[in-house]
Image (cartoon, rainbow, N blue to C red):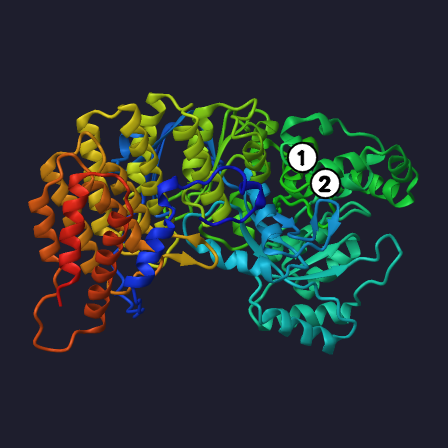
């Protein structure tokens, strides 16, 4: 299994002991196998839709229409297919169902001014894939499902943006501007814009500010060149400003977004007219000012659990230091920005009253004291304190933000939009602080894990104890969602390993919860079936692997009824037959391994007391059918994993020797009058590898069972055929 973090090395192997190839088996394979690999791509199949029905929702409508008190949201392949009262939505048969328990549902929140990967805790300039994913995960857990990162983004941020058009997605969407334009001359500005534009950013970013008189502003002829060049290349320009006169000059030059409040004086009719004429968004970033002075003492929010859930403890400790607080208290710039905040709040109210397009943003991220995700909720509370209504603020963070960024598929819960939404325990229209009462967050119809990797690593360190203050059913649901994560540590090391520990090794999951997991994981075998080359295979493959945990437990605890077993066996065989994505290992996502994982499930099902003798042949035939359908040589150990499923059959007291002999005979290659195609050669090799591996594992088994002796003889005779 993938090992992404040393925190898991001593946690106990997530596979069962017999899944490790013995030395004797390896010796036999070295003697018997001479493996070749011929890769043949298969044609893409029509995928089966991934459909989820979210019911019992109190859908918050931010327009003129009232909330829908008993709403259903039908999600297909990560997008909203239908939404409305329960009586108006027909749920397809076989759809996954999620009961939201009468909670309030709000479109995923958007922050239109953040910075990604500028810091990692107190450390600066942490431009890595891991830190980018981590920060987008923090935003997601705070219900901020989309962000616009305005300046300084490196390659990891562009990579993250590239991967957000597929499902599942377990972190916030990112839109970005790339390198901030800092050129000193018009010609240099045009060259820099062209260089940044080549990376296809969503917006260009400039700064027109002297930082309270301590630095040089970008001259008008330079920002005019930036705006003109960007527009010529089809890109809009966002501007960092402080002064009203600069904002007006930029608007006359054609700027497309004002990314901060005007903070030196009250906005006037001319400014409002210029903004309205081009419908330019106004992003107040009140928390930017707050962050410059709030740590002159210890803020009350340092005790708030919602803040502490994601805050870096080292940074919190640093900000509590008395010496640091005294420096901030005595800072002239801090006091100047404190005064500027009063102006900013007044201007925000005036902008909203004038009907300007106000969008929520914070400027969180460039410094560690601007806490990502949490500051977005502080910003919304400050906007209400400045005089806006909760509905206005929520629109600024959802539909208005999407409109400002010209994004048609986020910011609303409407057909065609991505199924990005936040489920709240309390109504934010009554109190904006209720945006903090987050029950769950969903992005592209996928539940965002409620805890970060550090939480789960600590659980592993604590011998997989259920963390205090949590409930097992909620954590099991979170782990089930993580089985589809493209992050190998989340999926493999955390989700599957922890489930194995709790379900099988520690046996702390009660039977009712195990039956719920059986239903959830069986449904997980079907989502997106038929797709190839997409991440949807992860949920299917790891659902199969996890079902194996329930199967081996049942072989010892005798929990499943016969009809439950029959349904599970039928689902496993159907999945083996219909899964088209047979990739083994992916350099980014780790093990996908659908064939091997299904083989593990069949291995344990084949040992069950419920398996009728006549169904032994069904398992064997399904294995044959799989090998004949795969048009590429399986090279990641699938043959031995399938062989172990066959071993389970040959070791049964009711081993059907005649059926086994007939199966072996059916593995003979067909007579051909023409040379085999590449696909036929791949099939022949896969069958040969299975035969050799099966002989190896049967021969390596030390149990003195007559059935194994007979099976070994039949296998040897089959291998000696030419």
When the figure is inspected, residue 496 is found, relative to residue 464, above or below; the finding is below
Residue tagged by mark 2? 287
Please indicate, yes or no, whether residue 228 appears anywhere in the rendered image: yes
Pick the residue in front: 6 or 135.
Answer: 6
Label at residue 474: none
Image location of residue 480, percent across then percent down: 41, 36
Check contact, mark 2 vs mark 1: CB within 8 A: yes
Residue at the spot of label 1: 378
| Drawn side of residue 514 relative to residue 386, left or right | left
| Residue drawn at point x = 62 percent, y = 45 percent | 358
Does the rendering let one see residue 57? no
Residue found 44% across the figure and 46% down from its top? 485
The residues tagged by marks 2 and 1 sit, at their Cα atoms, a distance apart of: 7 Å
Of 557 and 270, which appears nearest the observer?
A: 557
**Label 1 Cα crowd, 10 Å radius (few <14 / some 14-19 / many 20+):** some
Point 29% across, 43% down: residue: 525
Label 2: state its secondary structure: helix
In the rendered image, residue 384, in percent from the top left (x then y), is placed at 65, 32
């Amino acid at each position: 299994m993938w090992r992404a973090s040393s925190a898991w090395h001593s946690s106990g192997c997530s596979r069962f002991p017999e899944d490790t190839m013995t030395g004797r088996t390896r010796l036999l394979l070295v003697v018997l196998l001479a493996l070749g690999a011929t890769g043949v791509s298969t044609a893409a199949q029509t995928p089966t839709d991934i459909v989820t029905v979210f019911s019992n929702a109190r859908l918050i409508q931010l327009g003129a229409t009232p909330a829908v008190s008993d709403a259903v949201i039908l999600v297909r392949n990560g997008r909203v297919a239908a939404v409305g009262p329960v009586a108006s939505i027909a749920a397809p048969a076989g759809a996954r169902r999620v009961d939201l328990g009468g909670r309030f549902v709000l479109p995923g929140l958007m922050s239109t001014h953040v910075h990604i990967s500028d810091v990692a805790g107190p450390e600066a300039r942490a431009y890595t894939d891991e830190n980018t994913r981590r920060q987008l995960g923090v935003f997601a857990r705070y219900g901020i499902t989309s962000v616009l990162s305005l300046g300084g983004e490196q390659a990891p941020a562009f990579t993250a943006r590239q991967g957000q058009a597929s499902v599942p997605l377990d972190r916030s969407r990112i839109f970005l501007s790339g390198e901030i334009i800092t050129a000193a001359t018009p010609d240099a500005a045009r060259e820099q814009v062209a260089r940044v534009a080549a990376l296809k950013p969503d917006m260009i970013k400039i700064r027109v500010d002297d930082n309270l008189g301590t630095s040089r502003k970008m001259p008008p002829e330079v920002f005019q060149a930036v705006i003109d060049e960007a527009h010529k290349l089809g890109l809009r320009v966002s501007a960092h400003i402080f002064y009203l006169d600069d904002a007006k000059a930029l608007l006359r030059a054609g700027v497309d977004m004002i990314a901060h409040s005007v903070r030196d004086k009250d906005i006037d009719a001319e400014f409002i007219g210029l903004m309205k004429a081009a419908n330019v968004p106004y992003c107040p970033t009140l928390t930017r000012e707050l962050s410059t002075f709030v740590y002159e003492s210890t803020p009350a929010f340092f005790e708030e659990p919602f803040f502490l859930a994601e805050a870096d403890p080292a940074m919190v400790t640093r900000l509590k230091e008395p010496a640091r607080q005294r420096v901030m208290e005595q800072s002239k710039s801090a006091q100047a920005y404190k005064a500027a905040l009063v102006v900013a709040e007044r201007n925000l109210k005036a902008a909203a009253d004038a009907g300007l397009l106000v969008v929520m943003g914070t400027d969180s991220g460039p410094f560690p004291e601007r806490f990502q995700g949490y500051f977005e909720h502080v910003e919304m509370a400050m906007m209400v304190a400045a005089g806006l209504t909760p509905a206005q603020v929520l629109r600024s963070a959802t539909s208005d933000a999407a409109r400002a960024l010209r994004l048609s598929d986020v910011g609303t819960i409407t057909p065609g939009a991505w199924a990005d939404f936040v489920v709240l325990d309390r109504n934010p229209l009554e109190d904006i602080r209720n945006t903090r009462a987050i029950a769950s967050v969903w992005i592209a119809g996928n539940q965002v894990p409620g805890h970060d990797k550090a939480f789960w690593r600590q659980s592993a360190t604590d011998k997989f104890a259920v963390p205090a203050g949590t409930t097992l059913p909620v954590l099991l649901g979170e782990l089930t969602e993580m089985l589809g994560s493209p992050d190998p540590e989340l999926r493999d090391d955390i989700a599957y390993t922890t489930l194995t520990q709790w379900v099988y090794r520690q046996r702390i999951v009660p039977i009712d919860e195990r039956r719920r997991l059986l239903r959830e994981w069986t449904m997980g075998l079907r989502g997106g079936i038929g797709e190839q080359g997409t991440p949807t295979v992860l949920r299917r493959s790891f659902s199969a692997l996890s079902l194996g945990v329930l199967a081996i437990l049942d072989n010892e605890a005798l929990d499943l009824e016969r009809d439950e077993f029959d349904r599970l066996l039928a689902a496993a065989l159907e999945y083996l037959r219909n899964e088209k994505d047979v990739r083994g290992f992916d350099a980014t996502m780790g093990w996908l391994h659908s064939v091997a994982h299904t083989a593990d499930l069949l291995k344990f099902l084949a040992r069950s007391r419920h398996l009728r003798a006549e169904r032994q042949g069904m398992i064997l035939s399904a294995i044959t059918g799989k090998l004949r359908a795969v048009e590429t040589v399986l090279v990641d150990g699938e043959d031995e994993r399938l062989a172990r499923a066959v071993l389970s059959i040959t070791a049964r007291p009711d081993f059907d020797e005649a059926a086994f002999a007939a199966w072996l005979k059916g593995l003979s290659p067909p007579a051909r009058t023409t040379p085999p195609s590449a696909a036929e050669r791949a099939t022949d090799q896969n069958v040969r590898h299975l035969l050799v591996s099966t002989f190896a594992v049967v021969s390596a088994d030390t149990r003195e069972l007559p059935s194994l002796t007979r099976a070994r003889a039949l296998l040897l005779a089959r291998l000696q055929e030419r």
